[in-house]
Amino acid sequence: MEGSDHLERGRNAYAQQAWADAFKHLSAADEESPLASDDLELLATAAYLVGNDAAWTGLMARAYQELLQKGDAARAARCAFWMGLGLLDLGEVARGTGWLTRAERVVDDYGKECVEQGYLLVPSALQHLEEGDAAAAHDIFQQAAAIADRFGDPDLIALTTLGRGQSLIGLGETRPGSALLDEAMVAVTAGEVSPIIVGVVYCAVIETFHRIFDLGRAQEWTASFSRWCEAQPDLVPYRGQCLVHRAEIMQLQGDWHDAMDEARRARDRFSRPPVRPAIGMALYRLAELYRLRGEFTKAEEAYREGSRWGRRPQPGLSLLRLAQGRVDDADAAIRRALDEAEDRASRSLLLAASVEIMLAASDAPAARAAADELSELAAATNAPFLEALAAQAVGAVSLAEGDAQAALAILRTAWTAWRDIEAPYEAGRARVLIGLSYRELGANDDADMELDAARWVFQQLGAATDLATVGGLLNAPTARANGLTDREIQVLTLTATGKTNRAIAVELVISEKTVARHMSNIFTKLGLSSRSAATAYAYEHDLV
């Protein structure tokens, strides 16, 4: 094929958003005869969009030199800007900073007003945002936005809209900040911005919504953006931490198989030289999925490997220890993690896990304190995910304290919230607690229906540990014996197998004090005075 044919095909493929073909044909044309700056920029963009970072950086450097030689300083500066921002995202701080400095020098030498002056304000604003100075970041983004409006540059308008939204959220103005993030995503999905902006905006939006627990918006924009990407099968728009956040969204929605694939993809991508610290986040997500599926050995390995890359393994590792029956280890670890937690997001997740673990450790007062703190955080953020998490925690504590009626009401609220968020696993766990509340109230048919519904969900997801737990609850004896309630028969049966009160509390998700109360009732109703006598009774009446 003639070089001119490759060039024409490459241009056509680029116009049709067939990025792999564009890269292939433009590369072939470049080998035949070095491309001019316009086509070189197309080739560089195609390389970036198919995920070929090495080719992208080389081509952008060439385009920068070509544009300088042509005397087009403004466009050369923009090439240098994107090089700098891209290299920083790849973790190459020195090279990235060098290219941004070069871009600033070119603009200064140019000596005329240009839109690139607005672009070069963005890195400074991002640095202020990262350092926690949202007010300074907002002011700089505002300056850049004014330049973007003056020149009518849609890419810079999208970047500054995104930045102003993130800054407002950092200042506590969540509603107007979220609205600006929505506006930035509208520009992306409407095709109003250049391809290279697409992944930048999407990933930043998803990361921000995750940080404030607005998972509804994260889910909605992920679905919308995925539909937009379907027409471009060669596109690799997801970079950085948003790869892991996509896996989290898939996990929340019950797509555990796809979540596992996405987490592995993130791990593999971050493992390429230079290895990026975000690999720890990908490994933690893999560990969580292994834990939920009952693959404890793989989970522990992934937690440990993620920890080597700087991702603290909590609260997942503590929940793994709980599932392994190592309650004391889980309790000690989650308390240490809470003592060290600083930001609201990580503390909220730690509190939710600590409630479950502290109840298993028979420390109902500590569990109540954790649930109350979580409720306060949820009220302050007004995030449906946190509200559901807090309601479930409060309901679990109320159940353990023996107030099944109060527990039932709040757990119903939690289940409704999980259903609205479309989080099937969490909804299933809420139904288990609802079922246990019904049992405490003597509504055995209602209890069995709730537990059976939860079992069906866990079967669909492959949640092996939860499936075994709810299976044990459903298979517990239901026959009445001398006036014993279903819960008392469960406690008697577990006692007969040699379990201590503490072990029974863990298995039934109630407090040790509640188990002791049930044992006292069993002794009174059956006229017994010891655990050995209760064990003998259970065997004599075929309860074991």
Image (tube, rainbow, N blue to C red):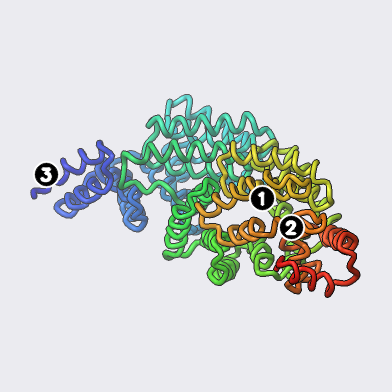
Disc tally is 3
Residue 239 in the image: x percent, y percent? 45, 51
Q: Residue at x 58, y 49 (%)?
A: 425
In the picture, the quarter occupied by the C terminus is bottom right
Of pointers 1 and 2, the one earlier in the residue sequence: 1
Q: From what the image shows, is residue 294 above or below residue 206?
A: below
Q: Is residue 277 visible?
A: no
Q: Identify the residue position indicated by label 3 in the image.
A: 5
Q: CA distance from mark 3 to mark 1?
A: 65 Å
Secondary structure beneath dot 3 equals helix
Q: Is residue 542 visible?
A: yes
Question: 10 Å neighbourhood of mark 3: few (<14), some, or many (≥20)?
Answer: some
Q: Residue at x 38, y 45 (%)?
A: 79
Q: Residue at x 52, y 59 (%)?
A: 282
| Picture disc at residue 432 | 1
Residue 254 in the image: x percent, y percent? 51, 48
Asked whether 485 or 258 is in front, the reply is 485
Badge 1 vs badge 2, beta-carbon distance below 8 Å: yes
